[in-house]
């Protein structure tokens, strides 16, 4: 067992730190993760379940209606992005919802909060600030797995 002992010791030491390594990887990549949520998910009109975001008084397919483009988008406060009939909701009007997003960490991982999260989720009747399955997979593959891989195998280069 003498030849295996250093390897077993290194594996045990790295295994005890994996949750901290994963959390630190997320902390180091918050901007990338927020971009996925804001642009690739909410910006394309998708909720946290990967479904179209639907307004209770809006179109059945989650797109802006003519009255949004022709009336509401011309009133103050003006929206930050164009509200074109037929375009998917992008959850961007004054910017408060997306601009106030921040991470909250605990032992289980993280949540993304926003100062208007509760109100927005109540209006739209769905979760909006959790990553959908596609974006969770991207974070796993591009952020967490590389950090874990490096943490696990780096000690062996020192043996």
Image (cartoon, grey):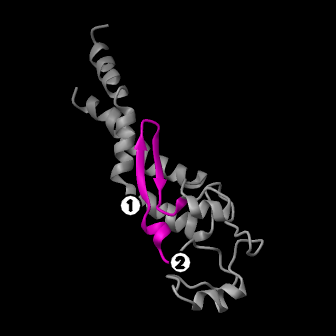
Q: Residue at x 33, y 39 (%)?
A: 150
Q: Is residue 56 above or below residue 85?
A: above
Q: Is residue 28 left or right of residue 104?
A: left
Secondary element under disc 2, as helix, strand or loop, is loop
Locate the C terminus by quadrant: top left
Instruction: Report if residue 97 lies within the magenta region.
Output: yes
User: Local crowd at mark 2 within 10 Å, few (<14), some, or many (≥20)?
Assistant: some
> Residue 113 at x, y = what percent?
47, 55
Q: Residue at x 69, y 76 (%)?
A: 63
According to the image, label 2 marks what residue?
93
Structural distance between the alpha carbons of marks 2 and 1: 21 Å
Q: Is residue 145 above or below residue 82?
A: above
According to the image, label 1 marks what residue?
31
Q: Residue at x 48, y 46 (%)?
A: 140
User: Disc 2 or disc 1, which is closer to the eye?
Assistant: 2
Q: Quadrant of residue 99?
A: bottom left
Seen as rendered, the residue at the extreme right is 60
The magenta stretch spans which residues? 94-117
Secondary element under disc 1, as helix, strand or loop, is helix
Mark 2 or 1 closer to N-term?
A: 1
Locate the N terminus by quadrant: top left
Q: Residue at x 53, y 77 (%)?
A: 93
> Residue 104 at x, y = what percent?
42, 49
Q: Quadrant of residue 32?
A: bottom left
Seen as rendered, the residue at the extreme top is 1
């Amino acid at each position: 067992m003498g030849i295996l002992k250093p390897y077993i010791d290194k594996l045990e030491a790295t295994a005890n730190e994996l949750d901290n390594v994963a959390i630190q990887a997320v902390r180091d990549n918050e901007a990338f993760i927020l971009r996925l949520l804001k642009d690739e998910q909410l910006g394309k009109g998708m909720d946290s379940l990967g479904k179209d975001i639907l307004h209770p008084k809006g179109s059945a397919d989650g797109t802006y209606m003519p009255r949004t483009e022709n009336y509401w988008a011309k009133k103050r406060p003006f929206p930050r992005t164009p509200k074109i009939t037929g375009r998917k909701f992008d959850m961007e009007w004054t910017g408060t919802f997306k601009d106030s997003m921040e991470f909250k960490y605990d032992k289980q991982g993280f949540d993304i909060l926003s100062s208007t999260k509760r109100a927005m989720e109540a209006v739209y009747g769905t979760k909006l600030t959790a990553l959908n399955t596609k974006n969770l997979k991207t974070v796993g593959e591009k952020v967490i797995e590389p950090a874990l891989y490096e943490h696990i195998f780096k000690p062996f280069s020192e043996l």
